[in-house]
Amino acid sequence: MTNLFSSLAEFVNLVKELPAADQEAESAAVDRNAQLTKPAGSLGKLEDIALWYAAWRGNARPSIEAPQVVIFAGNHGVCAQGVSAFPSEVTQQMVSNFQAGGAAINQLSKCFGAKLDVIALDLDIPTADFTAGPAMNEAELIAALQTGWDAVNENADILITGEMGIGNTTAAAAIAAALFGGSADDWVGRGTGVDDEGLARKADAVTRGLAANPDATSGIEALRCFGGRELAAMAGAVVRARTLNIPVIMDGFICTAACATLYAMDPAALDHVIAGHVSAEQAHQRVLSHLNKGAIIQMDMRLGEGSGAATALGIVKAAVACHSGMATFAEAGVAEG
């Protein structure tokens, strides 16, 4: 366990001082890419992904051998407002399903050679209902951030964070509204499949939450006042990955909202993060636009649990395999055009 922050102010300062990519490795990777046996730019976005990955791994000819997927689970007090189609008990039931190997993310992790870890955060103690005040106090938020930090395997070479938490699309919508403005209707979506009445309850909960937490406009305060423990843990894991030069594939709306709080602390904090997909949750693309992130795939997924990012992992692995495994013109004895 590494304790680099004992207060929220220390965490914010840490985010503002994160290491940058390896420019020498990136330059060498660009040179290598120019010599590979293909017309310039012919692999399109695969080339951009490979160069991004090489820069953050500090290796002009990298490989992906040890992907890690971490699912964090948490429960939300705002569920008392009727914002979900499922009861909070489902969070624990799905954690058990992950642990038994029965969920989509288990199959995707296995398919792409990723190690899957599942971490439940105090499921028997939901966060406070943010319609009446902050979801977490400082100590609770620090504990969740630290859990995410400690969950990252130092030997991983790419990280995906996923989540499970009934009610967490409402938390994500509240974070987005606090950071980017607009009305609750701009940010709430159907999540697990609520009907029109459920959607109206979600919007009402977000509206009342914003009124109850008027000062939650900074990244760290938006995370504390509206986020669940699993969102905070994802944020902590993403920062820890940066300190270890581990690139991150970002999942859907909830993960992106968690990452948005880091972006609000410092826009450079997400330079090592690539957006895996655009989910079917109606506000996800809008948040990605605020973060200046284009997604790898768009498959109308809305499952969460890291599933979109895990699917995109296959494309990232393909990009790196082509970049590092292809022969150069000189090696292949092929005349350059």
Image (tube, rainbow, N blue to C red):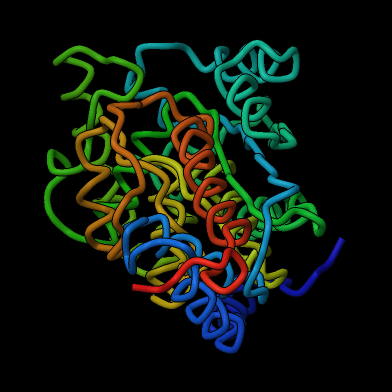
Residue 224: x %, y % from top left: 49, 56
**Quarter of the image holding residue 108?**
top right
Q: Is residue 202 left or right of residue 165?
A: left
Q: Is residue 37 left or right of residue 232?
A: left
**Quarter of the image holding residue 219?**
bottom left
Q: Is residue 143 left or right of residue 38?
A: right
Residue 294: x %, y % from top left: 29, 56
Q: Residue furthest bottom?
A: 24
Residue 103: x %, y % from top left: 59, 15
* Above or below 306: residue 26: below
* Above or below 115: residue 7: below
At horizontal 40% and vertical 68% (from top left) the residue drawn is: 263
**Is residue 13 visible in this depiction of the protein?**
no
At horizontal 42% and vertical 11% (from top left) the residue drawn is: 86
At horizontal 71% and vertical 54% (from top left) the residue drawn is: 143
Residue 236: x %, y % from top left: 62, 58
Q: How many marks?
A: 0
Question: Which image quarter is the C terminus in?
Answer: bottom left
Please state which of residues 21 and 101 is positioned toward the viewer in this rendering: 21
Please state which of residues 8 and 263 is positioned toward the viewer in this rendering: 263
* Above or below 107: residue 116: below
At horizontal 71% and vertical 32% (from top left) the residue drawn is: 118
Question: Which image quarter is the N terminus in?
Answer: bottom right
* Above or below 139: residue 233: above
Please state which of residues 332 and 181 is positioned toward the viewer in this rendering: 332
**Is residue 61 visible in this depiction of the protein?**
yes
